[in-house]
Image (tube, rainbow, N blue to C red):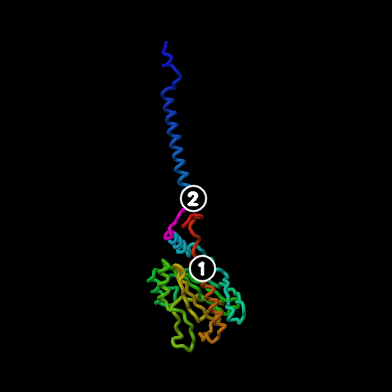
Amino acid sequence: MADPQASGNRPPRGARGRRAAALIALVLGLAGFVISATGMATQLLPRRFSAAQQQQIENWEIAGRWQQLTAGQIFPASVSYQLPAAVLQDATPLNLNALRVAIAPQSGCGTGVTTAAAASVLRRDGCQAVLRATYVDATGSYVMTVGVAVLPSAAAAKAAHRSLAQPRLTAANESGADRLPAGILVIRYHGAAAAMYDYSRQISASFPAGPYLVMYAAGYADSRPRVPVAADHYSYAEMTSLAGGVAQSVAETLGAPPAGPHCPGTPGC
């Protein structure tokens, strides 16, 4: 008779091996789950960014905004602006609207500006493209073209701005009145619109907004020759309010700081 101890209930050797393998697989599976869960938690839980990292993230987002937004978002169909109360001799400013009449195709940095000198400045500072649109006031009396030169950085935009002439008023009786500061090339029209908005520039200006150089030129909408608009305080104020209001709207759309990195409640984030 066989030894009872030797013939007990011990499972066959193959069964023991399968149980061991199953146990190992379970342990490895649990380990993998823990690692996966840890990785997911790392992505979902708030992160801490240094000030330099936050600034770099903001710069990346702002620099790519001109490609992420549509032309209609950069240059909306209507832009609100104000005529200062002092001009009206009133206690409150007058709220007005500028109406978009055209968006030009994206142009190169050598063809979207008025002079070869301006093109040289933009190319020197790494300009990538020039975007342009034209607006008129609600009465159709004034017209302005706003342009955006896309630069690689805020420093480059500031350098380009410093190199371009500062804005000044052009008057017919001034020396050199046939020349305005180098700046944005106004959008020319074809057909019936040409008679309405083929203007001569009266003012020209530029300012940096992040990695963008915002430029604008404004004038009368009836193609009248340049006149000393400084003599007409109201016309000058309305023309500059229109141009400056539209330009600021475009600058805020492209150059506004984005929302901070996703790390709510994390000190120093």
In the rendered view, would you say 152 is above or below 12?
Answer: below
Out of 80 and 33, give the one closest to the viewer.
Answer: 33
Mark 1 or mark 2, earlier in chain: 2
Out of 91 and 156, give the one closest to the viewer.
Answer: 91
Q: Position of residue 48 (x, y in %)?
A: 45, 54
Q: Quick check: 239 left or right of 111?
A: right
Magenta span has 127? Answer: no
Discs 1/2, front:
2
* Residue 195 visible within the image: no
Q: Residues within 10 Å of mark 1 (few under 14, many from 20)?
A: few
Q: Where is residue 20 in the image (x, y as percent from the top left)?
A: 42, 29
Q: Where is residue 227 in the image (x, y as percent from the top left)?
A: 52, 86
Dot 2: element: loop
Residue at 57% in and 78% down: 84
Residue that sits furthest to the front in the current view: 267
Q: Is the magenta stretch mostly helix, strand or loop?
A: loop
Query: Where does label 2 land, which residue?
Result: 45
* Residue 25 visible within the image: yes
Magenta span has 51? Answer: yes
Dot 1: element: helix
Residue that sits furthest to the top in the current view: 1
Residue at 50% in and 60% down: 259
Q: Residues within 10 Å of mark 2 (few under 14, many from 20)?
A: few
Out of 108 and 210, give the one closest to the viewer.
Answer: 210
Label tally: 2
Q: Give the range drawn in magenta.
A: 46-53
Query: Where does label 1 land, which residue?
Result: 252
Q: Which amino acid does label 2 sit on?
A: Leu
Q: Which quadrant of the rendered structure holds the N terminus?
A: top left
Q: Which amino acid does label 1 sit on?
A: Glu
Out of 118 and 103, give the one closest to the viewer.
Answer: 118
